[in-house]
Amino acid sequence: MGKTTFSGTLARMLARDGYDVLTIDADADMNLASSLGIDNPPRPLTDYKEMIDERAGAEGGVFKFNPKVDDIVEEFGVIGPDGVKMLVMGTIENGGSGCMCPASAFLRALLRHVVLKDNSAVILDMEAGIEHLGRGTTRGIDLMIIVVEPGMRSIETAARIKNLASGIGIKHFAAVVNKGSSEQVLAHLEELDIPVLGEITYDTELVRADLEGVAPIDVGGVAVESMEVIKNRLLKMAHNLSNNF
C-alpha cells in the first residue's frame, strides 16, 4: 500500500500547489485510482488493441517506433479531484526484456511525450520490484523514487532497481521509507548513495481510508502530514536537479 498511497497522495498535493499533474497507473494491480479518490478509472490503454495496432503497427509485421500519442491523455484519460489527470497503462503480456511488440513501443512513445512536457508533473506508479525495468518504459524520467520497507530484502531490491535503472539512463534516485525506519536502513541507503526524502509514519487512518475506499489525503492523519514533508523535500531536490542541467 505504501508505493501507491504515496503516488496518489503526492499527485494531489502537487496539484494543490498549482502543478499540472498527470498520473499514470503502470502497476498490474491498477490500484492508483483509489488513492487519488477517482471512483471510475479509465480503461487500460492496452485494452484498445485496434487503436494501438493502427498507430504502432500490427504484431508480426512492421511497426512504428514513434506512433502518434499526443492526443492520448485527452481522449483516454480522466480528471479526478484537484484536477489530477489519470491514465491506466495496462499490462503487456509479452513485455519482457527485449520485447519489441507494438504495445510496448506505443507505451514508450507515450511516456516520452508526457515526461518531456514543461510546467507539469508526471507521476508513474510502477510495478513493485524490478520487472518493469526490462521493458525500457521508464527511460527519460527525471527522478526515480524507491519506496523501501524496513527490511533487508527491500534494501536488496532497492540496490537492484538502482543498478538496472542506471543501465537505461536514469541518473537520479531517492528513497522514501514506509512504516518507519531504523539507523540500519538509513545506513544501507547511504551506502547505496540513495538520498532519503523522509519516512511515511505508520497510521491506522491509512488503513481506514483503504477499507472505506477514500483517498488518504481526504482522511488526513500523521501519515499524510509526513508525506507533506516528503513532498516539500522532493520539490527542493527537483529544483536543485533542474538548476544543474
Image (cartoon, rainbow, N blue to C red):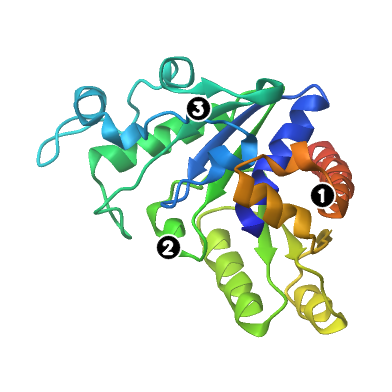
Residue 137, horizontal then vertical, whole percent = 44, 46
Mark 1 vs mark 2: which is more N-terminal? 2
Query: In what quadrant of the picture does the N terminus appear?
Result: bottom right
**Can I make out residue 33 in this image?**
yes
Residue 191, horizontal then vertical, whole percent = 77, 78
**Can I make out residue 140 in this image?**
no
Kindly identify the residue that appears in the image at 50 percent across and 55 percent down.
168
Q: Amino acid at mark 2?
A: Glu
Would you identify the image quadrant in which residue 7 lies?
Answer: top right
Q: Secondary structure at mark 2?
A: helix
Position of residue 121 in the picture relative to residue 48 (left or right)? right
Mark 3 vs mark 1: which is more N-terminal? 3
Total marks drawn? Answer: 3
User: Which residue position holds label 1?
Assistant: 227
Would you identify the image quadrant in which residue 46 lies?
Answer: top left
User: Which residue position holds label 2?
Assistant: 131
User: Which residue position holds label 3?
Assistant: 113
